[in-house]
Image (cartoon, rainbow, N blue to C red):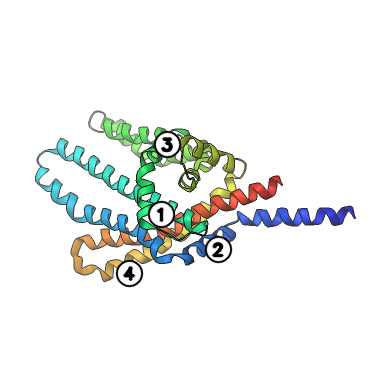
Amino acid sequence: MEHTNKTPDANEMIKQMQMIKFGGVFNAALDVIKKEPVMLIAIFLAPMIVTGLLDAYVWPLALTPLAAQPIVMAVLSVVFAVVDVLIGFFGFSMLIHAVAKVFGGHKIDPMATFNFVKTHFVNAIKLAIKMFVFTGAWLILAYFVAVIVLLPIVPAVAGLLGMLSPIALIVYIIVFFKKIMQASMGYAVYWSADKPAAEAALKRSIELGTGIEMTLFGNYFLMGLIGGVVTMLLSGILAAVLGVLGKGALAIAAAAASGVVGAFYASFQYCLKGQVEKFRGGHHA
């Protein structure tokens, strides 16, 4: 009798563990995409194409007359890069929030999604900064900034640091591996809340990720491999189709491919968060 009572618990544990394996998360993400495929892809595809057009046509046009003013050109290049990042981040935020709605059984309202993200976007940037500090990403950024700053002053040292940058990156990932994984669900937590809060989202992500860092890494790694291959294939196909657009075709094709794959990746990330929450509930029960 005692064995009979324990068996369902053991089976339930195995079932819960399967939830956070790659296959389970992938299928859950696929189910979400199937419910609103056009809308989910369009929400992220639009900003990605906008940044692609800006990078291919607008920014080069603005920078060309400044070729004789390298400092101004450098500053504007940074400004344009920040604009690209903000547009992409806003699109990603809309996508994650839309996925949360579909995951919860709701239909997507594009305008409501836009307004919700617009209202909470500043706090989302605060979350990004908190994650940036928590994961130690500022250290690796400081390393590359040092390379750029030292290049005109001490070229030899800058060159050495540049050669060692892959090693520095690997060391960073090893040292901060757990924190990177623990913080990885921060955006999914933030954009699924009715009243998003940066500090609470990061704290919740850490709670969910602690102890299963390798499982999270395995999921992200496999999804990254699949996403990378699909992105390359789509980029090549779209570049051939959009060849009539000239030199901007590659940038636009890459943006479009990233938008399509990004829609699934966001769904995957959100479903991973959802499956981990189910696992935690089942495990603790």
Q: Is residue 205 above or below residue 133?
A: below
Percent position of residue 138, x then y = 40, 34
Secondary structure category for the residue under label 1: helix
Q: Which mark is residue 237?
A: 4
Is any part of residue 57 visible from this angle? yes
Query: Nearer the observer, disc 3 or disc 1?
Result: 1
Q: In this image, 19 relative to 48: left or right? A: right
Residue located beneath label 2 in the image:
27
Q: Which label's residue is closer to the chain start, 4 or 2?
A: 2
- Label 3 neighbourhood size at 10 Å, few (<14), some (14-19), many (20+)? some
Q: Residue furthest bottom?
A: 241
The kind of residue tagged 3 is Phe
Q: Secondary structure at mark 3?
A: helix
Q: Quadrant of residue 25?
A: bottom right
- Identify the image quadrant of residue 161: top left
In the rendered image, which residue does mark 3 sit on?
132
Q: Are marks 4 and 1 in contact (CB under 8 Å)?
A: no
Kind of residue at badge 4: Ile
Q: Nearest the camera: 142 or 279?
A: 279
